[in-house]
Image (tube, coloured by chain):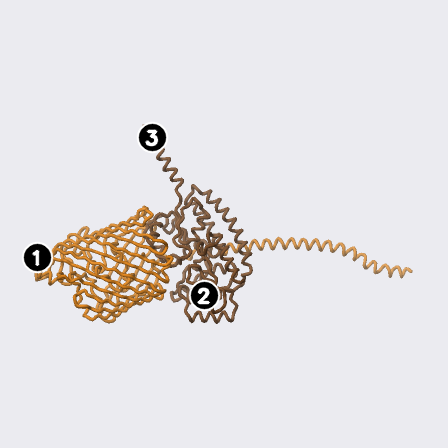
Chain colours: A brown, B orange
Amino acid sequence: MKIQNKIIVAVMALFLSRNALAKLSVFACEPEWAALAQELGGDKLKITSATSGLQDPHHIQARPSLLARARRADLLVCTGAELEIGWLPVLLQKTGNPKIQPGQPGYFMATDFVKLLEAPTKLDRSEGDIHAAGNPHIQTDPRRIGEVAKTLAQRLQQIDPDHASDYASRYADFDQRWRAAISRWQKQAEPLRGKSIIVQHKSWVYLEHWLGLTEAATLEVKPGVPATTSHLAQLLGMTKTSPVYAIIYAAYQNPRSAKWLAGKSGLPAVKLPFTVGGTKQATDLFGLFDDTIARLTGAGK
Amino acid sequence: MRKHLLLAALPAALVLPSAVFAADDVATLKKELDQLKQDYQQRIEALEKRIEASEQKSVAASATPAQKANSFNPALSLVLNGRVSTYSRSPDDYALTGFALGEEAGLEKEGFSLGESEITLAANTDQHWRGQMTLSLADNNGETSSSVEEAFIETLGLGHGLTVRAGRFFSGIGYLNGKHAHAWNFSDAPLVYRGLFGNQIKQDGLRLSWLPPTDQYIELGAEIGNGQSFPAGGSHSDIGDWAVFAKTGGDIGVSHSWQLGLSHYQADDIVGREAATHSFSGDSKLNGIDVVYKWAPNGNPQDKALTLLAEYFRRDENGSVDIEETGSSSLDGNQDGWYAEGIFKFKRHWRAGLRYDQLNSNNSGDNSEILTEAGLLADGFNPHRASAMLEWSPSEFSRIRVQYNRDNSLPETDNQGSVQYTQALGSHGAHQY
């Protein structure tokens, strides 16, 4: 009897300790949110990212492996604003995971917590692949990442109260380092203020807004509609009459149009990481902006 | 002298006080200036703080969304279909040797024809359910016929990987069966779907699916239905057909992914399943396997992608075949078929595909005259078909497809050509794997 009791206690203890040790499973839709979760949760979290830095988050498929991962997630951290509309709803419907359904604490859409730019006044598919809520590519502005971090840290504390103090202190530490890094980046990017750039896709509005860059044109005819030769010829004409600093494209994008225009106009075509993992240097969120600023300022030299 | 003194004193008097004054003034001015400086410093600091705060504010979210009466309307999407078809044989004479065709399983009419237009409405009902309905509108010789393709409710996050669906839905067996026809890679159903499923198996009933908490994707599903539609049929007061399926899949590196599925479908006590020439009563059992492989460089299917897909099904039917006012025969039917297709996206917006279909049947019974009249005796002929297609999709929402089939559903070859448009208007549906 006594031995039985001891066994029961031991088994219960094992379960309890297992519970306390169990890591919160985070399903990030994009690598920047996986990296942010890593900053805020560290070893308390088991993090997986649905896309890599070299994938276009608009257009991946709801693959079986993603279903298996979403099935076990405690927290979904995605961009929102319809960026993942082509595949995320399938994961939510097919997995039937109650923790990550809309409205639950485990459903975290970063764009719900920052101000979005470029909310279209006219919603019509003839305008290309537009997002009704506004431009979703918020991760190119570190101030917005800072805002998301604040809310995500609160959300982690809410979902995993056992480690609330860890999350709080990790956030405080991250916030301090992040603010310092932002002022450093702003200083480094000072020479870029007022410069005019041509971008491949409207992926960079938040970066432009942050650093005071002006978007002269996009290589795409309309959002999601690739460049045509006539459109590129028109852009080439434009670069002859008004000064353009550089042509910007994301690491995951096909650089052909950007390189063509660069070759013809003599302007530098600059590949930016766009997200964590986009370039070798962009290993985490700090590396992402270190590399972005370095590549941008380096373009003028 | 006094005058002189006075004169001398005057400038001094004029200067001296002012000199005293000046010293005083400089000090005050300096003080005031310092004060001012300090004041401005403070003001500048305050302003800087305000700017910083407002900058923070400008990146933080603000207003809650405006509430409108239609805010909760279901997502609406409309699929428009149309085509022009040519055949070297008359499509009215179409038959599939050794197989009974279900209601929807014929050929599109020759010349211009309006395909099925689909209207889909979907939304979350509340925190427990979501609902979806697809209405299909088609034109049959000037008369509009509408049918409920799908209408179901489904649980949202029941937990433990479980999902329950109730209503009318496409059965989860096979790979293509669960998808709407406009999401298929060719403009017609594989012959094995046409011959064994009547194009596509629908269930009016209940489905339970379960994803176990494994690293490897596994999905197990079970369905029960009223057995109203092909390959079941007739009326049932209880369960008319049922199905079970299992799927698994995963990634190989970042560029490759796959899925494998096994299915079983069964309808017992079918009473009077109608086909063009006869009716069937008895039991129908079906087993199948499907495999899909997809390649997308770095996981980006935008510019280049490859899909390879193959499915095999085998059906055993036992019962009787009746032809009105003629007679009846027993039937021991063994039918199977497969298809394989490869779709290559060779540049953005462009895809090309090849498909090969083959069917085999071995049907026997006690009255071969009846079976011959019912078109169920193949005499060793195996229907087969080779297809090629090319499609252009300038966006996710529109597609124009050209397709050619060399069709041997019957021993005489039919050369079939079609040009088809498909456009999806309205809300952006997510795509299944």
Q: What residue type is labelled 3?
A: Asn
Q: Can residue B168 be seen in this view?
A: no
Q: Which amino acid does label 2 sit on?
A: Lys
Question: Residue B303, located in which quarter of the rendered image?
Answer: bottom left
Residue B345 drawn above or below residue B253? below
Whole-number angstrom distance, CA of label 3 to CA of label 1: 72 Å
Q: Which chain carries label 2?
A: A
Q: Mark 3 lies on which chain?
A: A
Residue furthest top in the image = A2
Q: Is mark 1 on a helix, strand or loop?
A: loop
Q: What residue type is labelled 1?
A: Asp
* Mark identifier at residue B366: 1
Q: What element carries label 2?
A: helix
Closest to the observer, A235 or A5? A235
- Same chain for labels 1 and 2? Say yes or no: no
Query: Mark 1 and mark 3 in contact (Cβ < 8 Å)?
Result: no
**Residue A255: % across, % down:** 43, 63
Closest to the observer, B322 or A249? A249
Question: Residue A59, located in which quarter of the rendered image?
Answer: bottom left
**Residue B248: % across, % down:** 29, 51
Q: What element carries label 3?
A: helix
Closest to the observer, A270 or B183? A270
Image quadrant holding the N terminus of chain B, namely bottom right
The crowding category of the residue bearing disc 3, from other C-alpha atoms within 10 Å (few below 14, some 14 to 19, many at least 20), is: few
List the residue tagged with mark 2. Answer: A259
Q: Mark 1 lies on which chain?
A: B
Question: Residue B294, located in which quarter of the rendered image?
Answer: bottom left
Q: Which-is-in-front pick, marks 1 and 2?
A: 2
List the residue tagged with mark 3. Answer: A5
Q: Which-is-in-front pick, marks 3 and 1?
A: 1
* Mark identifier at residue B287: none
**Residue B269: % across, % down:** 15, 52
